[in-house]
């Protein structure tokens, strides 16, 4: 994590930097400049990635921080619109490194880094490591379960995971509509797992969806 933060800060500017080489023993790394590719538009993907870098690096936290939009410090930084733009720039720029939603890395056949998680294990991004992260989070620790999933506990947890959130009013004039929305999400939890998987998302664990019904939906007045 700290080395990745240095790459995106521009402190580490070549792929054969000694710090990066130390993490890849026995590998011949190129004397190639690193080009940082980031989102040009505001995005939750940027928030998730910078949330992780902020947790991993005090230097990043102090100088850049986290947000849907940040000022990228590396001199070689270039922007791309949407995940599509970042994936395209990484694909066509020699020596580039970027961040995209998993589905775009998979679709564009991008190489990816293994990252060391808090348990000290190097893990790759995939369905199993995302699911492990979801299982390693204390979802009840924040109102509405609005918790950060970065650096989740567990040997297999991918440390840059996040969830998709839905915001609803606790009280709405059209209570019948709120009830219908909850019916849809209940159906999605029960019947949407295959669709989520086909779209390269990971369904929430059944234990968690039961907890959402009990602790979050119970706060919504729909009668």
Image (cartoon, rainbow, N blue to C red):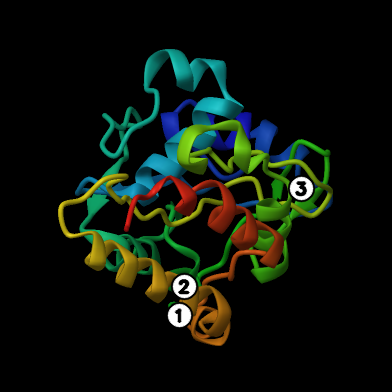
Residue occupying image coordinates x 30% and y 51%:
168
**Label 1, label 3: how many angstroms apart (C-alpha)?**
26 Å
Q: Please rate how many residues cluster around mark 3, counting C-alpha atoms within 10 Å: few if below 14, some from 14 to 19, many from 20.
A: few
Q: Nearer the viewer, residue 211 or 164?
A: 211
Q: Nearest to the eye among marks 2 and 3: give it.
A: 2
Residue 167 marker: none
Residue 24 marker: 3
SS under mark 2: helix
SS under mark 1: helix
The residue identified by callout 2 is 103
Q: Residue furthest left?
A: 173
Point out residue 135 in the picture as x, y percentages from the top left corner: 72, 53
Q: Is residue 166 visible?
A: yes
**Label 2, label 3: how many angstroms apart (C-alpha)?**
26 Å
Q: Are marks 2 and 1 in contact (CB under 8 Å)?
A: yes
Q: Is residue 72 above or below residue 28?
A: above
Q: Is residue 182 above or below residue 79?
A: below
Q: Please rate how many residues cluster around mark 2, counting C-alpha atoms within 10 Å: few if below 14, some from 14 to 19, many from 20.
A: some
The residue identified by callout 1 is 107
Q: Are marks 2 and 3 in contact (CB under 8 Å)?
A: no
Quarter of the image that includes the C terminus: bottom left
Point out residue 143 in the picture as x, y percentages from the top left corner: 48, 34
């Amino acid at each position: 994590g700290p080395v990745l933060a240095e790459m995106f800060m521009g402190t580490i500017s070549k792929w054969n930097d000694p710090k990066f080489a130390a993490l890849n023993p026995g590998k011949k790394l190129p004397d190639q400049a690193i080009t940082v590719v980031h989102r040009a538009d505001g995005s939750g993907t940027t928030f998730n990635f910078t949330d992780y870098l902020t947790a991993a690096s005090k230097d990043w936290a102090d100088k850049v921080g986290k947000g849907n939009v940040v000022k990228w410090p590396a001199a070689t930084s270039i922007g791309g619109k949407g995940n599509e733009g970042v994936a395209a720039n990484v694909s066509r720029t020699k020596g580039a490194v970027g961040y995209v939603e998993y589905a775009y890395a998979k679709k564009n056949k991008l190489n990816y880094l293994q990252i060391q998680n808090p348990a000290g294990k190097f893990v790759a991004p995939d369905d199993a490591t995302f699911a492990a992260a979801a299982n390693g989070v204390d979802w009840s620790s924040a109102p509405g379960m609005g918790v950060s999933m970065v650096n989740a506990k567990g040997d297999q947890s991918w440390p840059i995971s996040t969830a998709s959130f839905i915001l609803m009013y606790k009280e709405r004039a059209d209570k019948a509509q709120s009830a219908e929305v909850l019916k849809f999400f209940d159906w999605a939890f029960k019947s949407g797992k295959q669709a989520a998987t086909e779209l390269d998302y990971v369904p929430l664990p059944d234990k968690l969806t039961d907890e959402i019904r009990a602790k979050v939906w119970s706060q919504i007045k729909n009668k």
